[in-house]
Amino acid sequence: MTFTPLFIPYPSWLHPEIFPGVPVLGLLRWYGLMYVFAFSTAFFLLKKELTEGALNSSTYTATEDDIFSFIATGIVFLIIGARIFSTLIYDTNGLYREKPWLIFWPFDVNTGQFTGLAGMSYHGGFIGGLAGMIIWCRRHKQPLFKWIDAMVAAIPLGYTFGRLGNFLNGELYGRITTMPWGMLFPYAERFSTSFEWVQEFAAKIGMAIPEGTHLVNLPRHPSQLYEAFFEGVVLWAILWALRKHKKWDGMLSGLYTIGYGTFRFFIEYFREPDADLGYRIAADAGAPIYLNTSLLNISTGQVLCFLMILGGGGVLVGTYLRSRKKKPAV
C-alpha cells in the first residue's frame, strides 16, 4: 500500500519575476501586476455603482471623471501610507529611521538590484487610503461616507489579487501544518532533522527525509490564499450584496472595517508572524512563531485588527446616530 504524502510542493515554475532571467523584462514582478489588477477591479466595480446612482445626491450627479480622480487620490495616499507604515512599524533594524529617503527607494541598498517597494502594510494602506478619500471629498464637497461606502463595496475583491501576489512571491506564508493542503514554501525556515519533533512531524505527513539531510522544509498553511478568499472574495460578496440595502451612509464603511478586522484577526492564527517582531502579547513568552501554541499569543497584525474592529464599531454607531438626527420629526 502506497502512502500519499499529506502536503503539496510549491510549484517550481513560480517565481516573483514574471519573466525571470530576461533582461529588462525580469524587473516585472507578479506582485506589482497584482496591484494593477486590484485597482482596475475597484475602478470597474465603482463605475458599476456609479451607474446605479449610489454616488448621486440631491444636488450633484457624479461622473466617471469623479470616480477616476477619487480612486487615483486614494491610491496615491494608500501607497504612501502602506510603505511608511511598513518601514516604520515592521522595520526593527532602524535603517529607515536613520535614512528615511530610502523608504521610497526601489533598489537594494547593498546590491543595487531593483526590488520595487518591497514591504507594504495593509493597515498603513488603510490609513493612507482613508486620508486620501477624506481629502478628496472635502476638496470636492462630496458626502464623505456616501463615497466611502461605495468604495468599500468595490475594493475587497481587489485585495484578492494582492494576496495572490504574496503567494506567487512565496512570502507571508503560514505556520507549519499537518493538513493535506499544507505547502512547502521555498523561502521558509528550515528545521534541523536532529530534533525528535521534526522527525515525528515528517513521519506523520509521510515525508521521507533522505539520509544525510540536516535541514528540512516542512509544509505550512497557505495563509495568503486564506486571506485572498475571506478578506477578498467573501467580504466583497457580503458588502456587494448589502450595497443596495444599506440603511444609512456609513453603514458599509463600519461593516467593512469590522469584517476585515475580524477575518484577518482569526487568519493571523494560521499566518506566521514576522520573525523579528514575534508576538506583541504572549501567554507563553517562549512560544515558537511557527506553531500556534495558544490563542492568547497575539501578533502585531492582530493588535491592529482589534483596533480596526473597535474603530468600525465606532463608525457604525456614530454614523447611525448622525443619520437619526437628520431625519425630520414625525
Image (cartoon, rainbow, N blue to C red):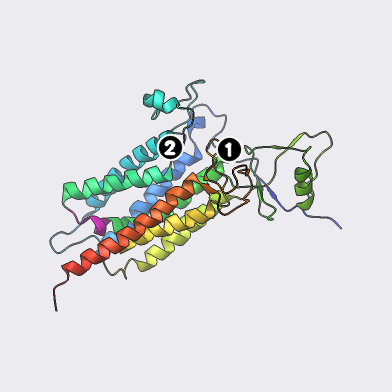
Residue in the image at 47% along x and 47% along y: 301
Residue in the image at 42% along x and 27% along y: 96
Residue in the image at 48% along x and 31% along y: 92
Q: What is the tally of numbered marks visible in this picture?
A: 2
Residue in the image at 22% along x and 51% along y: 66
Q: What secondary structure prevails in the magenta region?
A: helix
Q: Which quarter shows the N terminus? A: bottom right
| Part of the protein shown in magenta | 142-147
Residue 317 point in image, percent of width and height: 30, 63
Residue lying furthest bottom? 330
In reply to whether residue 277 is colored magenta, the answer given is no
What amino acid type should be assigned to the residue bearing mark 2? Ile
Residue 319 point in image, percent of width and height: 26, 62
User: What residue does disc 2 label?
Assistant: 89
Which numbered disc, 1 or 2, marks the residue closer to the eye? 2
User: What residue does disc 1 label?
Assistant: 15
Residue 51 point in image, percent of width and height: 27, 62
| Mark with earlier residue (1, 2) | 1
23 over 250 or under it: above or below: above
Q: Tell me the element at label 2.
A: helix
Label 2 crowd (10 A; few <14 / some 14-19 / many >=20): few
Q: CA distance from mark 1 to mark 2?
A: 27 Å
Question: Do residues under tags 1 and 2 come within 8 Å of each other at their CB atoms?
Answer: no
